[in-house]
Image (cartoon, rainbow, N blue to C red):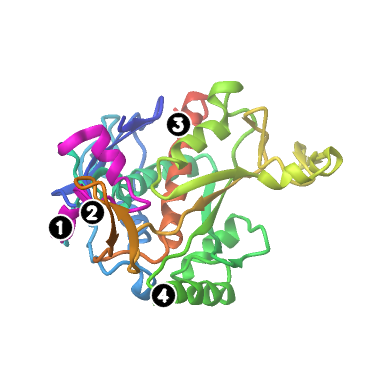
Amino acid sequence: MNTIGSELRLTLFGASHGPCVGAVLDGVPPGLTVDLARLQGEVDLRRPRADIGTPRAEEDRVEVLSGLLDGRSTGAPIALLVMNRDIDSQRYERFRTVPRPGHADLTARSKYSECADLRGGGQFSGRMTVGIVAAGAIAKMLLEERGVRIAAYVRQVGRVLDPEDRDVTAALLSRSNDVRAATPELAEAMRAEIAAAREEGDSVGGVVQCIADGLPMGLGEPFFDTVEGELAKMMFAVPGVKGIEFGAGFAAAGMRGSQHNDPFVLVDGKVRTAKNDAGGILGGITNGMPVVLRVAIKPTASIARGQRSLDLETGEQTDLRIEGRHDPCIAPRAVPVVEAAAALVLADLSVRGGMLD
């Protein structure tokens, strides 16, 4: 469905080449001061940047239709609207019979038949994440009232890997460059990796790391409403995400228990751990340490170089060359989306846990 969340509920609407995209955020407590300039700034971080993004030039001005009065939440659903203005749909008709490898053309057709909107990816498009970022900005404001900060950065692009785990402060510094890398040197190396893929008519994947600090101990539930489970569900709603890990993640499979276990210590009178291989979560519940997660972003499916596909009408294999405006790497633009997605989940869990009211 198009809605996620329990107490703080997000609904997305629109399509990539439809008149608009947007979101409705329901469950925001009354009285929250919503900084609309900051909200717009968060959405602007998602826009493509020069030589490493798509040429599609959407203004992405956010219009608030309901739920605010004199800059504060009323308790009613907050409706957020962004118009689509730079649309070019002429190249998409062929994909009804010749599906693009790596795209949802085939599965969309199997589910929605001839009603499937394939223009720009329709409701499967990354364009839908505008609503996630806009709503996530409000969730961030909710959390920050309780001292919770969330930030993400690009940890990897192709073969270029940031060898260090960064904290929230360092992650926020990634906003100073268009690749969203933690340092200028890494930004240059990652930019070169993206440029090389684009030059070859190809694309490249990446990893986005997200950190949330200031969360109290005790959020989440065991088994079916774990913090990891709720975050994973939201992250897999982000187009292009193909994997997720927390703390040491898959590296834990190569460790001994004596290596992976985080010793408990007392810090300023509070129980914490000496390191954070658990990623801030034990038994599905926050343990007071920063929640650390990484998501793997696949290479952009739309590439300029020729590919093989299947003509569904003739049953014959055929050559396919995709034209249009596409990102050679999604990871930099995914950073604000991952931040927003994490904020929405953690704010929902906080309301459910009585931390926010």
> Where are the magenta residues, as a range?
87-114
- What amino acid is at disc 2? Gly
Q: Which residue lies under the disc numbered 3?
A: 348
In front here: 93 or 134? 93
| Residue wearing tag 1 | 89
Kindly indicate whether the residue at mark 3 contacts the one at mark 1 (C-beta within 8 angstroms).
no
Q: Earlier in the sequence, mark 2 or mark 3?
A: 2
Mark 1: which amino acid? Ser
- Disc 4 secondary structure class: loop
Of marks 1 and 4, the one in the foreground: 4
Provide residue 261's location: percent of width, then percent of height. Answer: 80, 39
The residues bearing labels 1 and 3 have C-alpha atoms spaced at a distance of 37 Å
User: Which SS class for mark 3?
Assistant: helix
The residue tagged with tag 2: helix, strand or loop?
A: helix
- The disc, 1 or 3, on the residue closer to the chain's N-terminal end is 1
Badge nearest the viewer, 1 or 3 = 1
| Marker disc for residue 200 | 4
Q: Is residue 63 visible?
A: no
In this figure, which residue is indicated by the disc labeled 2?
A: 120
Q: Position of residue 159 (x, y in %)?
A: 58, 67
- The reply to whether the C-beta atoms of the residues labelled 3 and 4 are less than 8 Å apart is no
